[in-house]
Image (spheres, helix red, strand yellow):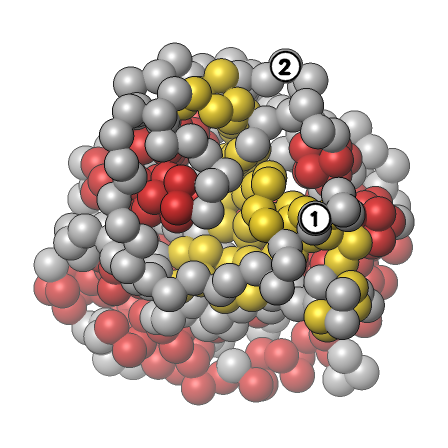
């Protein structure tokens, strides 16, 4: 994992950055970036995505195999990579001419590998870049340490953490809170009330703890999270609206229903015990990539929404991409950790969330003003700025 990949920016002036970027605090300059990014738009990971009887009508066709990066998703990623390149060139992090040291690490799924390659080509066009990854479909403990048995994990303790996140009234209260969305989702899935069609009628529960296995919901909220994400991916991939939710879903529905997806992550991926285990190997990689002065200027980690949600939970970070619910990880969206330096060599860390809006992912238009928001890191105040960490304090927060 210590190997650095060499990448570069082609000669010439980078395109101007049209979005108003959050400027570093006074007296600080950007000198390193680590970003944990979700892969781009994909189809459902299995076909059909939900059990028989969950919906009325055939599910839409996709141009690639289940779970693979789509051509539209690739194009959206290329746009965001070009944007990042322009932004970091303007900030002086990357040179306008010649090469910069860049490291790219990807999980072993086709969508994460191709996301890494697409991003590298846009960030460093014309330069030799070979993202680090295991052979396709070979489980990588870096991204799935619990599944790979690479970290101690107490399933009962994880279950208790999930129930604590649900609150004193339990998971049933979460289902009641989201009941209007479940009702609307059934209308989209079934068109009209149909015996045996839909998902809302099955009560939500928490599956029994299994040694070495992550917590899992059962029933309505489990299937609703999947269904809501499928609808979002259909929309994000640019499908005609008659193909999005069988023509029964509106863009507003897509955004509201994404709360079902983010709710699952709030319960299953963000609780501290689970998040810490999910990031058992990624967190040290992030910390080390921010630390040394001889490392890469940019380290990009191509992973999954679960990885993003767990890092958000571990650091207690919150965002809201336009078109999605709060804390829902967007396709191609990233938690960006900036290392900032002062004139005396002091080093600090600031967190951002960078993403195209849902409408921008769906569109084929050039990217000019994505969503970029500062995410204050709780418990940190440096140079009088709440949410800004010293590098040492950030490392302690990340690895504690």
Left or right of residue 276, residue 125 in this image: left
Q: Residue furthest front?
A: 343
351 in relation to 281, above or below: below
Is label 1 in a helix, a strand or a loop?
Answer: loop
Left or right of residue 129, residue 159 in this image: right
Left or right of residue 305, residue 213 in this image: right
Work out whether mark 2 precedes mark 1 in sequence or the reverse, and give the earlier one: 2
| Cα gap from disc 2 to disc 1, whole angstroms | 29 Å
Position of residue 215 measured from the top left corner of the image (x, y, whole percent): 71, 53
Is label 2 in a helix, a strand or a loop?
Answer: loop
Q: Residue 186, located in which quarter of the rendered image?
A: bottom left
Position of residue 138 measured from the top left corner of the image (x, y, whole percent): 56, 19
Position of residue 360 measured from the top left corner of the image (x, y, whole percent): 25, 59
Identify the residue shown where x is 64% and y is 58%.
27
> Which of pointers 2 and 1 indicates the residue nearer the eye?
1
Q: Nearer the viewer, residue 117 or 396?
A: 396
Q: Assess disc 2: are there few (<14), some (14-19) or many (≥20) residues with their C-alpha within 10 Å of its C-alpha.
A: few
Identify the residue shown where x is 87% and y is 36%.
152
Q: Nearer the viewer, residue 81 or 283?
A: 81
Residue at mark 2: 3
Identify the residue shown where x is 76% and y is 65%.
383
Position of residue 182 measured from the top left corner of the image (x, y, whole percent): 44, 77
Residue at mark 1: 343
Q: Assess disc 1: are there few (<14), some (14-19) or many (≥20) residues with their C-alpha within 10 Å of its C-alpha.
A: few
149 in relation to 205, above or below: above
Q: Residue 272, located in which quarter of the rendered image?
A: bottom right
Residue 342 in sight in this render: yes
Left or right of residue 197, residue 373 in this image: right
Residue 163 in sight in this render: no
Q: Quadrant of the N terminus?
A: top right
Q: Nearer the viewer, residue 130 or 58?
A: 130
Q: Nearer the viewer, residue 149 or 3?
A: 3
């Amino acid at each position: 994992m210590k190997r650095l990949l060499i990448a570069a920016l082609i000669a010439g002036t980078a395109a101007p950055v049209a979005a108003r970027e959050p400027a570093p605090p006074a007296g600080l300059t950007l000198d390193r970036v680590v970003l944990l990014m979700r892969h781009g738009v994909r189809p459902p990971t299995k076909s059909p995505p939900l059990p028989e009887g969950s919906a009325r009508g055939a599910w839409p066709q996709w141009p690639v195999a289940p779970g693979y990066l789509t051509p539209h998703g690739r194009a959206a990623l290329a746009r965001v990579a070009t944007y990042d390149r322009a932004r970091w060139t303007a900030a002086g992090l990357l040179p306008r001419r010649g090469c910069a040291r860049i490291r790219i690490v990807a999980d072993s799924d086709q969508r994460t590998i191709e996301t890494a390659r697409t991003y590298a080509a846009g960030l460093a066009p014309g330069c030799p870049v070979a993202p680090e990854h295991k052979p396709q479909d070979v489980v990588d403990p870096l991204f799935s340490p619990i599944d790979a048995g690479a970290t101690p994990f107490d399933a009962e303790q994880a279950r208790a953490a999930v129930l604590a996140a649900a609150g004193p009234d339990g998971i049933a209260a979460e289902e009641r809170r989201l009941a209007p969305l479940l009702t609307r989702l059934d209308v989209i899935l079934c068109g009209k009330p149909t015996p045996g069609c839909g998902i809302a009628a099955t009560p939500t529960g928490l599956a029994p703890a299994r040694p070495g296995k992550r917590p899992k919901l059962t029933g309505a909220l489990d299937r609703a999270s999947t269904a809501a994400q499928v609808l979002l991916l259909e929309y994000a991939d640019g499908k005609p609206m008659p193909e999005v939710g069988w023509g029964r879903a509106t863009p507003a529905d897509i955004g509201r229903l994404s709360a079902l997806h983010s709710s699952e992550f709030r319960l299953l991926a963000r609780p501290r015990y689970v998040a810490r285990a999910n990031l058992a190997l990624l967190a040290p990689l992030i910390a080390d990539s921010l630390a040394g002065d001889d490392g890469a200027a940019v380290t990009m980690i191509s992973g999954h929404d679960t990885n993003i949600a767990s890092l958000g939970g571990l650091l207690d970070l919150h965002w809201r991409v336009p078109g999605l619910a709060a804390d829902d990880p967007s396709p191609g969206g990233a938690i960006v950790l900036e290392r900032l330096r002062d004139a005396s060599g002091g080093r600090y860390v600031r967190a951002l969330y960078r993403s195209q809006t849902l409408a921008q992912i769906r569109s084929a238009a050039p990217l000019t003003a994505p969503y970029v928001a500062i995410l204050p890191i709780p418990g940190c105040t440096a140079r009088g700025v709440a949410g800004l960490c010293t590098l040492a304090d950030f490392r302690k927060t990340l690895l504690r």
